[in-house]
Amino acid sequence: MKNLSKLALFFSLNFLIIFLAATGLRFLALGVEWARQLPQRPETFLTLVITAAHWALSFALYYTILLTLCYAARRNYFGLMPVSCIMVLSIFLCFGISLALHYWKYVPPAETAGRQIGENGLVLSNTLHRNETAVILLRGTADPFGPRVTAIPDRPLVFQESTANARISLPPVPFGNDTPWFVESLFIDIRLNAEQLKQRLNEGFLSFFIYSGALIFLLSSLGFAIKISVWPLANLFIGIIVFRGILAAETFLNSLEMQEILGSFFMNIIPTTMAVPLIFCLLGLLVHVYSILVYISKKRDKDGY
């Protein structure tokens, strides 16, 4: 019971710390992305916080389960009770925070007006390469649909007095962005997971519990991957790779193409929305059975049978 209390405390503290830190960092990133768009639409502080918190919830869910499994492996806490503890706490915290964010969005906030970035003659380009089309806003971001000069490679400059009626989309304000693709793809997959959880909650509590419970059941079964080697740091990196694979598989299974394939495969047996949770449950069950069999075989070898 004492070990179980330590595990619960470790999970809860890490989940809250990671969730709050990730929310703050994601809020700053969303603020920068909002500032880059032209023309700026009125945004609210509350909207950015809620969007950031949804993203941070998915990140905290994956990362905290991984850290807790690593902690349990080092302390030799593995068994039915520790895994059950991780599952119960994950579902409780995930549902509680999701429900709070769901009702928090109905609070009427005050709008944050757009902020002017750059002066007259601001140059916008889709990329930072030299051979890309550039748009020069003669009046800056104060009048994004006002007079402009378009510079197309190997062509004369084009002057336009106004594009107010055309509503042509403008390239974003050219802030530097050197984020590697593997990091950017991770952020995208976490965002898709957050949107999936939010959509399930909008469909009803039952749909949310089925999907989140199946996902958490699968993640909590991956403890065997954390005990492959005798080096804890190596086990952590192996766990990161395995969890990244699960996140990528979740994005793949929830894509429109795979939803159509799964719908045609299961036909009228189960609803299409339940196909992915069923796959998670089956995979998690197989991994749990494998872990139990490995544990029994090692115990028999240790006892000399």
Image: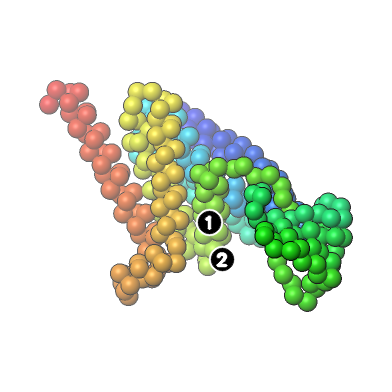
The location of residue 279, given as percent across then percent down, is: 34, 57
Asked if 159 appears above or below 233 in the picture, the reply is below
Res 86 → quadrant: top left
Q: Residue at x 56, y 35 (%)?
A: 14
Q: Residues within 10 Å of mark 2 (few under 14, many from 20)?
A: few
Point out residue 57 in the picture as x, y percentages from the top left corner: 57, 48
Give the residue pinned by disc 1.
192
Q: Amino acid at mark 1?
A: Leu
Mark 1 neighbour density, 10 Å: few (under 14) some (14–19) many (20 or more): some
Disc marking residue 57: none
Q: Which residue is mark 2?
A: 202
Label 2 SS = helix
Q: How is the structure coloured here?
A: rainbow
Spot occupied by residue 33 in the image (x, y as percentages of width and height): 69, 52
Residue 118, position as x, y percentages in the image: 83, 51
As shown in the figure, which amino acid type bears the numbered disc 2? Asn
Asked whether 179 or 174 is in front, the reply is: 174
In what element is the residue under mark 1? helix
Q: Nearer the viewer, residue 98 or 149?
A: 149
Point out the frontmost of discs 1 and 2: 1
Count of picture labels: 2
- Toward the viewer: 15 or 122? 122
107 displayed left or right of 103: right
Q: Earlier in the sequence, mark 1 or mark 2?
A: 1
Position of residue 302 relative to residue 84, above or below, is above
- Viewport quadrant of the C terminus: top left
Distance between the alpha carbons at the discs numbered 1 and 2: 15 Å
Determine whether, in the image, residue 93 is placed left or right of residue 100. Answer: left
Q: Residue at x 59, y 43 (%)?
A: 179
Q: For residue 288, which quarter of the picture? A: top left
Looking at the rendering, in which quadrant would you find the N terminus?
Answer: top left
